[in-house]
Image (tube, grey):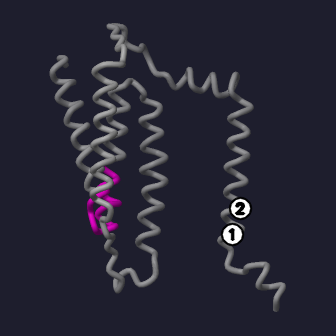
């Protein structure tokens, strides 16, 4: 494919990501927001593919689409009286949000045009980075990796303890 084809495809995925993210923010229906979040996550994963970060793209799809989005949809769908309750959100604070948007966008454009030194290269990454990530994770960074897994396990145990139906404090009071 030519360079212009890559550019067109990149801008297509960038537009899908931005417009679906805007729909997530401005939609008043929670279910529509969750489904448009699906397109946002897939758009971000496609942008990672364009950055030759295939491992992060697959992780984006597995973790965010397969885990977080499904959990969010189940949470919305399994709430009590979903058919009776009108799930609408109020879009508030539009003026401060627009001011913040203009400020951050202006800062990014200023940095992009005046402060950043952009380095370009014609060298492309060869092969996949998954092998390098796996080697570094299991050799040099094995201790932080294991500490993160223990922390996540403790968070899971704590969440399960807090979500129990039979609260131990209530059982002691009876």
Q: Are marks 1 and 2 in contact (CB under 8 Å)?
A: yes
Please report the residue visible at 26 percent of the width from the left and 63 percent of the height from the top: 27
Of residue 80 and residue 128, the one placed in the foreground of this image is 80
Q: Residues within 10 Å of mark 2 (few under 14, many from 20)?
A: few
The answer to whether 114 appears left or right of 168 in the picture is left
Residue 90 coordinates in the image, percent (x, y): 31, 70
Of residue 91 and residue 107, the one placed in the foreground of this image is 107
Residue 114 counted in the magenta span: no
Taking 97 as reference, is 122 above or below it? above
Q: Which mark is residue 158?
A: 2
Q: Residues within 10 Å of mark 1 (few under 14, many from 20)?
A: few
SS class, disc 1: helix
Residue found farthest to the top: 122
Residue 62 coordinates in the image, percent (x, y): 46, 45
Circle 1 is placed at which residue position? Answer: 162
SS class, disc 2: helix
Q: Main secondary structure of the magenta part?
A: helix
The answer to whether 171 appears left or right of 124 in the picture is right
Q: Quadrant of the C terminus?
A: bottom right
Residue 69 coordinates in the image, percent (x, y): 43, 56
Taking 167 as reference, is 59 above or below it? above
Residue 85 coordinates in the image, percent (x, y): 36, 83
Point out the stretch of residues depicted in magenta.
25-39
Quarter of the image holding residue 12?
top left
Please report the residue visible at 68 percent of the width from the left and 55 percent of the height from the top: 155
């Amino acid at each position: 494919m030519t360079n212009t084809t890559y550019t067109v495809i990149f801008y297509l995925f960038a537009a899908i990501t931005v417009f679906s993210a805007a729909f997530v923010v401005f939609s008043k229906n929670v279910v529509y927001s969750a489904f448009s979040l699906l397109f946002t996550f897939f758009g971000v994963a496609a942008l990672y593919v364009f950055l030759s970060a295939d491992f992060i793209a697959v992780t984006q799809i597995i973790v965010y689409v397969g885990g977080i989005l499904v959990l969010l949809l189940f949470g919305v769908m399994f709430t009590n009286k979903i058919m009776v309750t009108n799930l609408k959100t109020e879009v508030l604070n539009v003026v401060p949000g627009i001011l913040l948007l203009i400020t951050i966008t202006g800062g990014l454009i200023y940095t992009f045009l005046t402060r950043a030194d952009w380095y370009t290269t014609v060298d492309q990454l060869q092969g996949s980075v998954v092998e390098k990530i796996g080697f570094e994770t299991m050799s040099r960074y094995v201790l932080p990796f294991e500490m993160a897994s223990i922390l996540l396990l403790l968070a899971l145990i704590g969440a399960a303890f807090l979500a129990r139906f039979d609260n131990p404090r209530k059982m002691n009071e009876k």
